[in-house]
Image (cartoon, grey):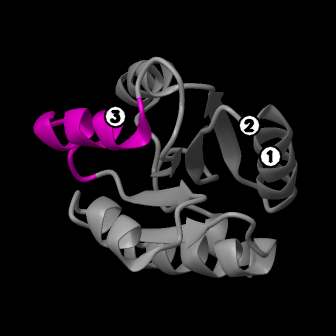
Amino acid sequence: MLGIFKSKEKTDRARILVVDDALDLVDTIQCRLEYCKCEVITASNGKDGLEKAAKEKPDLILLDTNMPIMSGPEMLECLKKDPDMKNIPVIMVTALCEAQDIAKVSAYGIADYITKPFDFTELMVKITNILHNKNFE
């Protein structure tokens, strides 16, 4: 699975932006992704996440739904309106697990979602599938 994170582009590592206000979770995700040779960028709210997405142009965004300052859906709406960022795949990371909650975040055009608490292996499968579709090998 580790080989999937090598890019054919200028950089040799996938760039993943993790936007979540749960700092312990962000640290854990960052540690695991860096172990898998990913470059990880972090933000603790949607406003900072949007700014970092515009500046860093990540290959994938892991985005929490409920955050201060700007929520995940609000950030996602801004991403989808920006021609330079609208095609960045997003995995929503949510504690909301009811069917209507999942349908609501899915309506924003996300690549996938995962509910908290999650199994890291499941998250890695989702990331791998998305990056593989972006021609990361």
Q: What's the residue at 79%, 33% (across, down)? A: 23
Judge left or right: residue 33 versus residue 4: right
Name the amino acid type tagged 3.
Answer: Met
Compared with 51, 59 (above or below) is below
Q: Name the quadrant of the N terminus.
A: bottom right
**Dot 2 alpha-carbon crowd within 10 angstroms: few under 14, some 14 to 19, many 20 or more:** few
Judge left or right: residue 44 versus residue 103: right
**Residues in magenta?**
71-87
Relative to the observer, which residue lies in front, 93 or 98? 98
Judge left or right: residue 103 versus residue 125: left
Q: Which residue is mark 3?
A: 75
Q: CA distance from mark 2 to mark 1?
A: 5 Å
Name the amino acid type tagged 2.
Answer: Ala
Label 2 sits on a secondary structure element that is loop
Name the amino acid type tagged 1.
Answer: Leu
Q: CA distance from mark 2 to mark 3?
A: 17 Å
Q: What's the residue at 47%, 23% (across, down)? A: 52
- The image quadrant that residue 14 belongs to is bottom right
Q: Which residue is mark 1?
A: 25
Q: Which residue is mark 2?
A: 22
